[in-house]
Image (cartoon, rainbow, N blue to C red):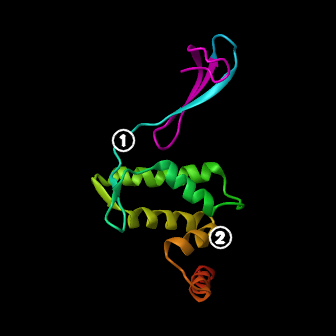
Amino acid sequence: MHCPYCQFDRSRVVDTSHDSRGGIRRRRECERCRQRFSTYERPILATPLIVKQDGTREEFDRDKLVRGIRISCAKRPVSAADIDRLVGEIESKLQGMGREEVSSRVVGDMVINGLRELDQIAYIRYAIVYLGFDDLKAIREEINRLLEN
């Protein structure tokens, strides 16, 4: 592990902690400049290919999912940690399915359900695109459904 400050290639681990998804956070100290920094390790497990609606297949891209959720959560009181937790849960569920291919619809449904619990405005923003709301009446009906619950 190279120090992000001086690029020295040796550091010592000061502290280690584990998270609920099996990741490891290590607090490190550079042996040359004595600056401290954190690293995060997570297991790399096989995720299924995502089958899009047009039939094409692509690798699951965690960063792409994070970007999409962040757009929905822009200017909302949703922390980066909450977004990362949601993406981690979705990724874990996909890995736990044990399938080689999963429809993009399955991933979208997981996102929509997670956002509904996380932030209702972010949910509506995502739903407008994902569920294809193309008029105000459809959006109003969805908002009314949220308000009833």
Mark 1 crowd level (few <14, some 14–19, many ≥20, 10 Å Cα): few
Give the x, y percent position of residue 96. Answer: 34, 51
Q: Which of the two discs, 1 and 2, labels the residue nearer the N terminus?
A: 1
95 relative to 88 in the view: left or right: left
Q: Nearer the viewer, residue 142 or 8?
A: 8
Q: Residue pushed farthest bottom? A: 137
Residue name at image x 49 percent, y 37 percent: 23
Q: Residue pushed farthest top? A: 32
Q: Is residue 38 above or below residue 7?
A: below
- The residue tagged 2 is 121
Residue name at image x 37 percent, y 63 percent: 52
State yes or no: residue 64 in magenta: no
132 relative to 82 in the view: left or right: left
Q: CA distance from mark 1 to mark 2?
A: 32 Å
CB within 8 Å, label 1 to label 2: no
> What residue span does the magenta drawing correspond to?
1-29
Q: Quadrant of residue 53?
A: bottom left
- The residue tagged 1 is 45
Q: Quadrant of residue 106?
A: bottom left
Give the x, y percent position of residue 93. Answer: 40, 54
